[in-house]
Amino acid sequence: MVGSSEQGLRLEKYRERSDRFLTELEEEIYRHFAGLKPEFELAAIHERYRDLTSLEQARWIGERVDGDGRMRELWHFACEGFLGAVTRADEERLATLEAGLEADVDGERIAFRMLGPEIANAADRERRGRLERARCTLVDEELNPILLDLRGSLRAAVRELGSESAVDLYRRFGLPLDDLATQCGSFLDETAGLYERSLARLLEMRLGLRLDQMARYDTPRLLRASHWDAAFPGERMLSALKATLAGLGIDLRSQKNVEIDIASRPSKTPRAFCAPIEVPSRIVLVINPIGGPDDWRALFHEAGHTEHYAHTSADLPFEYRRRGDDAVTEGWAFLFEGMISTPAWLTRLLGEEEARELGWEGAVQKLYFVRRYCAKLLYELELHAATDFSAMPARYVELQRRATLIEPCPTDYLRDVDEGFYCTSYLRAWAFEAQVRGALVERFGPEWFKHLETGELLRGLWSQGRRLSADELLREINGSQLSLSALADELKKALA
């Protein structure tokens, strides 16, 4: 039997090596998706750290989980490491294939990763349809065979961890899957009429279409909001972010632990992302400025992650610097993203009337995404429990169509899946953000983002990393309970 002292040393070594493991993974993610290298080479990294992700290691830590949240989080990490090791070959194949995949549309070769932006920017509706059909075909013919292999490998690996399905495993990790699924059903019912009315109005305003005329290839264009582009030029994105942070007492230029990658490269992903390579000593914010409010939202979202990681205390243990409740860091990201839909923040850019208009449009988009993610959770609970996937494309279409009133492409039934039930983090983060912002408005007023005291409060909360869950943080901030119902109330007010 391993003594308590020897066991403690083994766990500490495991934490130290896990930190190094994530550093190398994040560096590889950064370099590939920033367009610095075409290959996505995870195998060598996993090989160097194979002791962290073995089945035996996951089982050993799992046997020592008691009421200690740190140990359960470490077990969660070990299990996901094992699952990642099992699927890494398929993930590398997918990423490398996506990076080089092209579609032939109207005699033009278009990179697969640029099809989404192309659809969003195409004013010609027939061209949008051709682009979307090309995208769906590539997903079905090129990506889905690999995704099916990956799904089978994951199910077998989950059983090796002692669970019948991923649903069972993630319940054991403490994810509130059942309670959140119930809340999602209530949210969809509670906001159905509001959503239909709001979407119909937005569709008419932006595209001149009725709901019964809308097709899935109209969605990127609808969310693109191209008529606002002049107010949100790509070259002003970074300066607007710096000014917002300055209002909170944060000088982005002087943050030595934050790097900003703004260089243009052919294979660089079009959306901003944050790479927490070393937490908190090296955080990279990657942007490829295109412009438009959606691009600004993406930048501000990733900046929320960046500031959270950059202010995380270096004294926290691995489990709370690198791991913990993902709804916490997503919540801080949504708090910053929400600026682009906050009339009080928008007024200085647009004037009062236009700020209210874009604020309303942003609330409609938020309602769309929350409802879409509610459907994602309900779908993923069924997908992860399924042994036969033949009925899943139709089920995916049914649930998404009911939630969004837009029929998705059935070939996306495997690609539109967040592994590890990450959709729960987004759902809980939206509720967390709405309730935190409400508390900030109550304490500092509608322009809470202009107060140095707000920045001081946020930095104190960020310094805790993910030591506390979103539920615990919210109770600490104002004693409230995390709830999708509270989010529904906030959206009703915004769309009144």
Image (cartoon, grey):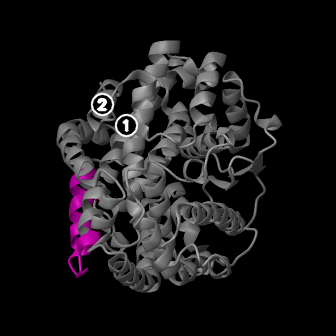
Q: How many marks?
A: 2
Q: Residue at x 32, y 64 (%)?
A: 408
15 versus 424 height, above or below: below
Q: Position of residue 443 (x, y in %)?
A: 49, 14
Q: Which residues are magenta?
A: 383-406
Pointer 2 or 1: first along the chain? 1
Three-letter residue code for mark 1: Ala
**Is residue 399 among the parts visible in the rendering?**
yes
Q: Residue at x 63, y 63 (%)?
A: 22
Q: Secondary structure at mark 2?
A: helix
In the picture, the disc for residue 439 is none
| Residue behind mark 2 | 486
Q: Is disc 2 surrounded by few (<14), some (14 to 19) or many (20+) residues within 10 Å?
A: some
Q: Are marks 2 and 1 in contact (CB under 8 Å)?
A: yes
Quarter containing the C terminus: top left
In the picture, the disc for residue 431 is 1
Q: Is disc 1 surrounded by few (<14), some (14 to 19) or many (20+) residues within 10 Å?
A: many
Q: Position of residue 462 (x, y in %)?
A: 59, 35
Q: Secondary structure at mark 1?
A: helix
**Is residue 445 among the parts visible in the rendering?**
no
365 versus 415 height, above or below: above
Is 145 situated left or right of 462 in this image? left
437 versus 69 height, above or below: above
Is 135 or 177 nearer to us in this picture?
177
Three-letter residue code for mark 2: Ala
Is 392 situated left or right of 456 in this image? left
Q: Position of residue 441 (x, y in %)?
A: 47, 18
